[in-house]
């Protein structure tokens, strides 16, 4: 059973490494509303976000580009709450951050120019690209590589992705094992305490009953 689970895990990692680590979404912000979403990210992974913010115009009855609109992006590690990125940006642009630790990361966006009681409606288009930190350093020399060399490099990157995913899974497995061992240790300790209390209670009851019978001259 363990072998089958391992094979399925490896197949899943290979499939994930083949699929592009890029996804896009859009959502709406009203006034000072903040939108957050979480991503499970491995250690030393670069996340690049390209965004476009458009403001609803009542006069033109459509979303338009407004240079006065500001977007603020913050990224926190979960559950520690450690902030690894915080920037106020223009209505259209790009942001980048690199993860220091594996785990859940909260990515939050909101308008930095809207007041508490503002009714401004913003449509935000966001494209996120997740990749290895080494990919960005080697992009500059990509044009000089032959097609075969680029293919070999892509395969090396996929192998690196699989290794990072395996390392991430091992970290989660180690954490789960430590929690299980700690829980088992607490259970054993509590069981021993219960047995000791039960033994003391039985001994006290036996002594009390013996004293009672002796007082009644039944023994």
Image: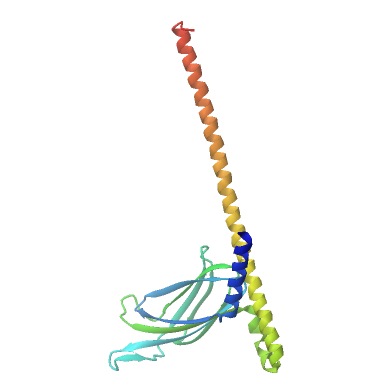
Q: Nearer the viewer, residue 31 or 131?
A: 131
Q: Residue at x 69, y 80 (%)?
A: 156
Q: Is residue 111 above or below residue 178?
A: below
Task: Residue 101: tell me if it is visible.
Answer: no
Q: Residue at x 69, y 92 (%)?
A: 147
Q: Nearer the viewer, residue 182 or 85?
A: 182
The single residue placed furthest to the top in the displayed view is 217
How was this image coloured?
rainbow
Q: Is residue 84 above or below residue 150?
A: above
Q: Is residue 217 left or right of residue 132?
A: left
Task: Residue 76: tell me if it is visible.
Answer: yes
Residue 99 lies, in percent from the top left, at: 58, 72
Instruction: Kindly indicate the quadrant of the structure image that contains residue 215.
Output: top left
Q: Residue at x 57, y 53 (%)?
A: 179
Tag count in the figure? 0
Q: Residue at x 69, y 90 (%)?
A: 141
Residue 143 lies, in percent from the top left, at: 67, 94
Instruction: Kindly indicate the quadrant of the structure image that contains residue 68.
Output: bottom left
Name the quadrant of the N terminus: bottom right
Residue 148 lies, in percent from the top left, at: 71, 90
Q: Is residue 157 left or right of residue 12?
A: right
Q: Is residue 106 above or below residue 138?
A: above
């Amino acid at each position: 059973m363990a072998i089958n689970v391992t094979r399925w895990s490896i197949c899943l990692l290979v499939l994930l490494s083949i699929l592009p680590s890029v996804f896009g979404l859009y959502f709406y912000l009203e006034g000072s509303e903040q939108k957050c979403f979480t991503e499970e990210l491995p250690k030393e992974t670069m996340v690049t976000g390209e965004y476009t913010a458009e403001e609803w115009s009542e006069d033109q009855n459509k979303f338009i580009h407004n240079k006065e609109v500001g977007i603020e992006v913050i990224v926190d590690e979960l559950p520690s709450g450690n902030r690894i990125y915080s920037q106020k940006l223009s209505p259209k642009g790009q942001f980048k951050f690199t993860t220091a630790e594996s785990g859940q990361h909260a990515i939050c966006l909101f308008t930095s120019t809207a007041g508490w009681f503002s009714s401004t409606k913003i449509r935000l288009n966001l494209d996120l690209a997740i990749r290895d930190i080494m990919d960005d350093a080697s992009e500059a020399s990509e044009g000089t590589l032959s097609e075969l060399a680029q293919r070999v490099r892509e395969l090396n990157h996929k192998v690196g992705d699989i290794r990072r995913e395996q390392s991430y899974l091992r970290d989660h497995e180690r954490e789960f094992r430590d929690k299980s061992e700690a829980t088992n240790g607490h259970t054993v300790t509590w069981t021993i305490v219960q047995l000791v209390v039960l033994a003391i209670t039985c001994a006290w009851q036996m002594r009390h009953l013996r004293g009672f019978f002796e007082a009644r001259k039944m023994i």
